[in-house]
Amino acid sequence: MRIAVVNNFFPPRTGGSAHLSEALAKGYAARGHDVLVIAAAYGGAPAEEERDGMRIVRLPSWQLPQTRLAVSFDILFASRPSLWRRLKNVLDDFRPDVIHQHGQFFDLTWATGLYARKRKIPTLLSVHTRLENPQASYHGIFRFLDATMVRPPMKLHRPRLVVMDVLMDEYIKARYKGAHTGLEYIPVGVEPDFTAHADAGIVRARHQLGDAPVILSIGHVIPLRDRVTLTEAMPKVLSEFPEAKLLVVGRTYFDAYQRRAEELGVAHAVIDAGVVPKTDIPHYLAAASVESHEQGIGLGTASLEAMAAAVPVVAPVRPDNFPGIDLVDGENIHLTAPGDAEGLADKLITVLADPEKARHVAEAGRELVREHFTMDRVLDKHLAVLEEQAARVRR
């Protein structure tokens, strides 16, 4: 097949959707398919390059102004008068059998959707982010944007949608009814052995951690993953483990947790590591005693990577988060209630106080990832859908 992969976010831009779209694109190429990646320009990356069996075209982009609505998130758009002509030329030259889009509210998704409709090319759209904000004042705004800017272009080309968890399933059914041709339940994928050569000493030396227990929290800090509850759990954790550190890895777009740490007098135990290269994440996981972060009451790539590395995970997630896959408290993960700082502290203390039991739970978590969430398994599922879509057109 000739597969076009489209995502405004693509490495060197960091983030879950960027890394997953890259991993899938590389996987498609490794399986013998022709792959074209179309992304928004970012961080001085070349406008065009060929690597890992794929061709990458990055179109000129501009950043959404930093406002409270966008939470200062560096959202990139490629819209400009020349976009349609450039996109049409690139895609006409490539002649895709299918287009795999990432992100429902990006202009490259809308533009390639229009192209696909005109050329009668099937599209598969992975919905990575719910257009939501926990602040009530923004709730209606996001619903309005979904109804007026996201659903109408989606309804034009009617993609098949990839659903990654139960929360996304509920969101899609509420917001995008009638704007797609069906749902495919495929979780995010991780490389199970990517921490094989990790060195905890690198991170412990970098942040002067010594032998302190480390509560690792990976992922950009945004309102849906604000780390406030985790910070509010720290006073109780520190009463039992005075040397413990909360190590936050990712860009801070929303600094409420830092202000809360100052108010609670625990700022000395909260470390903002900022953005780190993807290649350093294994070292951070190796240094971790436990991983925990708010994921909008879900379980994302960072938590699954921690589980794959046999790091105990404490998460405010529903047991049925992944349809057909059981998350069992105290067996393969440690579950907490959303917003319950005291309960979260108790779970963190339990993990830190009984390393042997925590190790058994972490090993079971690793086996769960190997059974359901490896990139190979996720790649197989995506290719099965793409091949079925392409075959329908050929018939």
Image (cartoon, rainbow, N blue to C red):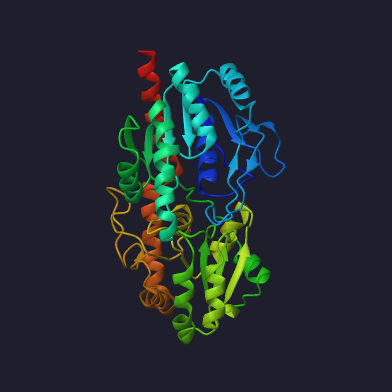
Left or right, 201 with reference to 316: right
Asked whether residue 198 appears in the rendered view, the answer is no
Q: Is residue 34 above or below residue 262?
A: above
Q: Is residue 54 above or below residue 71?
A: above
Which quadrant of the rendered structure holds the C terminus?
top left
In the rendered image, residue 314, in percent from the top left (x then y), is placed at 40, 67
Q: Nearer the viewer, residue 46 or 120?
A: 120
Quadrant position of residue 364: bottom left
Q: Nearer the viewer, residue 229 or 17?
A: 229
Left or right, 377 with reference to 12: left
Asked whether residue 99 appears in the rendered view, the answer is yes
In the rendered image, residue 330, in percent from the top left (x then y), is placed at 32, 68
In the rendered image, residue 250, in percent from the top left (x then y), is placed at 58, 59
Q: Is residue 276 above or below residue 353?
A: above
Count of numbered marks: 0
Q: Nearer the viewer, residue 395 or 213?
A: 395
Identify the residue at horizontal 40%, vertical 25% (top origin).
387
Identify the residue at horizontal 69%, vertical 33% (top origin).
47
Q: Is residue 91 above or below residue 262?
A: above
In the rendered image, residue 284, in percent from the top left (x then y), is placed at 57, 63
